[in-house]
Amino acid sequence: MTISLRSATEADLMAVGALHQRSRVAAYSSFLPPEALADPTPEAMGRYWVERLTWEGTDHRMTVAERDGRLVGFSYLGPDDEGDPATGLLNAIHLEPSERGRGTGRALMVDALDAMRARGWTRAALWVLRDNAHARRFYERGGWVLTGLQRDEHIGSALVPQLRYGREL
């Protein structure tokens, strides 16, 4: 029952979308209303990932985690969204809800940081929902620190504050 990591393929993306939606609902339902989490559907989230990788596939990287041949998580990284050429952005780590606390997220984070170093980036950044205390603790244990930047993004109809974290590579 060990975790294996590999690069995502196009064949993974619909399952990644469904996992992403399950992960969002489980992680955000304590602070977002159900209607904000109702959309997109798992199928729409899968189509989102197909479309996103069509446009970003040359400079972004998705890694999937499998346990016993079953998709249980993914990470997504790419260039910094603030335009710093020395910084890579960890866009996402999402897990099946049952994988929380099993080391899968940590394995994905370590892999993503190694991939950023391999690309020559010297810093890493990410955005996390302000009210997602579990994710914030996870990243802080991984050496990430608040940068002081904040932005608001929509999740469904809800306007949600996000905080930027950074760390040296």
Image (cartoon, rainbow, N blue to C red):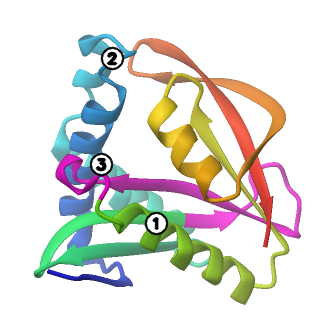
How many neighbours does mark 1 have within 10 angstroms: few (below 14), some (14-19), or many (20 or more)? Answer: some
The quarter of the displayed image where residue 91 is located: bottom right
Image quadrant in which the C terminus is located: bottom right
How many neighbours does mark 2 have within 10 angstroms: few (below 14), some (14-19), or many (20 or more)? Answer: some
How many neighbours does mark 3 have within 10 angstroms: few (below 14), some (14-19), or many (20 or more)? Answer: many
At which x and y percent is residue 161? Answer: 62, 20
The quarter of the displayed image where residue 119 is located: bottom right
Amino acid beneath label 2 = Ala
- Which residue corresponds to the image point at 33% horizontal and 73% vertical from the top-left? 64
Image quadrant in which the N terminus is located: bottom left
State which region is magenta. Answer: 77-101
Residue placed under numbered mark 1 in the picture: 106
- Whether 117 is drawn above or below 150: the answer is below
Amino acid beneath label 3 = His
At which x and y percent is residue 66? Answer: 22, 76
Circle nearer the N terminus (2, 1): 2
Which is in the foreground here, disc 2 or disc 1?
1
- Which residue corresponds to the image point at 63% horizontal and 82% vertical from the top-left? 114
Q: Which mark is residue 20?
A: 3
Tag 1, which secondary structure?
Answer: helix
Q: Residue furthest bottom?
A: 118
Question: How many numbered marks appear?
Answer: 3
- Which residue corresponds to the image point at 26% horizontal and 12% vertical from the top-left? 35
Q: Can residue 54 be seen by looking at this rendering?
A: no
Circle nearer the N terminus (1, 3): 3
